[in-house]
Amino acid sequence: MLKLQITNEDNNKIFQNLNNDQIAAVKHINGPLLIVAGAGSGKTKVITSRIAYLLSIGKRPDEILALTFTNKAAKEMKERIARLVEPEKAIKIWAGTFHSIFARILRKESHLINYTSNFSIYDQEDSLSAIKTVMNNLGINIQQINPNFVQSRISSAKNRFIDIYQFERSAESPSEKIIAKIYIEYDAYLKKNNAMDFDDLLVNMIKLLDNNKDCLNYYQNKFKYILVDEYQDTNRAQYLIIKLLAKSHQNICVVGDDAQSIYRWRGADIHNILDFQKDYPYSKIIKLEQNYRSTKTILNAADSIIKNNRNQLSKKIWTNNPDGDKIELYSTFSDYEEANKAAEYILKEKNNGRNYGDIAVFFRTNAQSLLFENALRSNQIPYIIIGSLSFYKRKEIKDVLSYFRLIINPNDNEAFLRVINEPPRGIGLTSLRNIKQYALDNNLSFLETCKYAFNINDLQKKAQVSALEFYNLINEYKYLAEKQSSFSELYEFISKTGYLNLLQELQTDESLDRIQNIEQLLNDIQRFYENNENGNLSDYLQQISLTSDIDNKDLSSDRVSLMTIHSAKGLEFPVVIITGLEQGLFPLERSDMHYEEKEEERRLFYVAITRAKEKIYLTYSETRSRFGAVQNQNKSQFINEIPKELIISNFESYNKDNITKTKTYKKTFENHNEYSQISNYPDNYSQLLGQSDLKIGDIVTHQQFGKGKIVQLTGFGQQQKADVVFESVGKKSLYLKFAKLQKI
DNA sequence: GACCTGCTGATTTTT
DNA sequence: TCAGCAGGTC
């Protein structure tokens, strides 16, 4: 009786502020369910309420499995559930990223797949380095085939659950055959290193379940309720695992939005969500179509854009929110000016009473970031870059972590290679080659080989001594892996390696920074131990290898956020500035681009637009420095896909007289390194541009169009273009080398 | 073995 | 432009 009362109370709390569709999604707990959750439709609220509901009706937390793509999403989910139910229950839910949950299971069941539980997890950089090692062993030159390409081929094979035999069988072209060879060796190398790359965490999970009936039964039984977030981004391997786990009870709930699928290039298969009903014929579909985030203007724009894609689930997103401001479109002459323009809007918004933290600047590629950083810094606007070089990816951090990896997993040859000569120990390429050869001949790990350094005849005396010393050092500190060691113990180890000394001697700003970073890392380990009573160094390494520091970035402080659109997924901001809207940049274009890749670019734009709550600025530049050269850019096709009535175009820079224009131009290039060697700027900037002596304001004649006035000059040399307003036909953009304009 | 120089090729990156 | 590399020199 009492129990029932509590349940009702819980339910009231759970169903508060949910609309009818959301309630239906929360309550449908038996059988397959697809929730198509449009942008801003309260998806996270539904997921967390659903789990809270399961708990409130007496389901056990440890029979619930909730899979997300990011740690951040998992963390948010857990926190929000904890607010709805007893926190001690919330903790017991199996909620986490695909990779971290599977890593946890694989460590537990490692004996079933021929690993030991202390296996290393290789991130992309480690994996690339391992591929290079393997290519080197096979005598395959990196000129012959790009290791990055090899890596992406292998990764995509694993994501599609294509094993080495299948891959080898289907390899037809010479390059595919080479990759097959590398794939086979790479696979063996990882096993030998007792290591898995990110993709292996999925692949080995399938193998585990496929090849061990008891294990499969156990987990099928255990996870009675499965929930998958961002289902549109699952790849084949993830899809297969979910299918295996849900097979017996079919209580599978997937949530996603096909319009926001932006990871095709990483193996995500949009068909997983499009075909959910085929996979689960008795499934129910609930669409969450009411948007609580954005204005009508923003949603209309988003809708008009996505309409241009063919492949999608039908839905109509709507909102009760007001119309809101129109979208403002700006263009500038150079990418440098574009960044300054963005800073200008930010200051304008700030003056209108917004906080910096309300504003985000999006770009398509990371390379664009620097211009905005500079522009914001010179305007004293505080900013935060999301997704920049992660703390854990810094060289010194990776080096120190490799020392730790080595004491945990002595078979980890990649970790060995990273640190054996860092600091220099007189073991260079030649010595290393000898060590590798001896390891191969005697089936030893590289570290173990060092123990027998004096048996390696080809090794120089000095290298023999160093190698043995290195072995002894690692061995001496092996005990650190087993216990919760203190800061000073860890510090002592890293000091003894000579790594700190190397940095201390340099005494540069950079080296002092690096020392601080290492100290910060050791502090971080301490904190981890404080929060995890039974955790050891290996647990710490696992945690950080599956964490990016985006997860920890504090968006709450009052700073403008700079990020790529991919990083923006799942976030929202009152004001969003989307930059670089130029054909070829956004959408990014390549000549051999697949039609589905083009649709993905459009979805990416859709994601960008739907991050905004109140106001959007779109910007593009007429010229842009890419790969060291200045290129002419054309306006993105996406801009034309937004109805004109939703946009205010502002091309003020076109209308300014040529004195102002010249000034801004000079300013632009004074700040561009590539032009800074030009000490005396000619008064007439068109001379600066190239061979032509035309300038803005000149009256010219054209063979076909007749008389006109130059309003804009862009590009350099062969690429130089003029915008001319002709009396007969209006504004035309012409290449000077073809147009043969005559100055009057 | 360590350091210098000249060539090449380049998206997005939840884990 | 710029990082990452191979290949040469000390």
Image: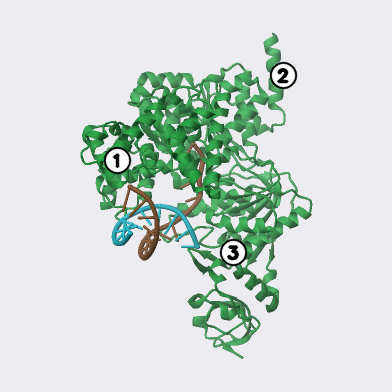
Chain colours: A green, B brown, C cyan
**CA separation, marks 3 and 2?**
57 Å
Label 2 sits on what residue type?
Answer: Glu
Q: Residue at x 47, y 38 (%)?
A: A234
Looking at the rendering, in which quadrant would you find the C terminus of chain A?
Answer: bottom right
Which residue is disc 3 drawn over? Answer: A335
The numbered mark 1 sits on a residue in which chain?
A
Residue A181 in view here: no
**CA separation, marks 3 and 1?**
52 Å
Q: Which percent across, then down, holds residue A732?
A: 59, 77
Name the element at disc 2. helix
**CA separation, marks 2 and 1?**
72 Å
Name the element at disc 1. helix
Between disc 3 and disc 2, the foreground one is: 3
Which residue is disc 1 drawn over? Answer: A463
Query: A710 or A302, which is in the foreground?
Result: A710
Label 1 sits on what residue type?
Answer: Ala
Which residue is disc 2 drawn over? Answer: A9
Q: Taking A322 as reference, is A538 above or below it?
A: above
Query: Which mark, by number, is residue A296?
Result: none
- Which residue sits furthest top? A1
Classify mark 1: residues with Cα within 10 Å, few (<14), some (14-19) or many (20+): many
**Could you say which quadrant of the image residue A24 lies in?**
top right
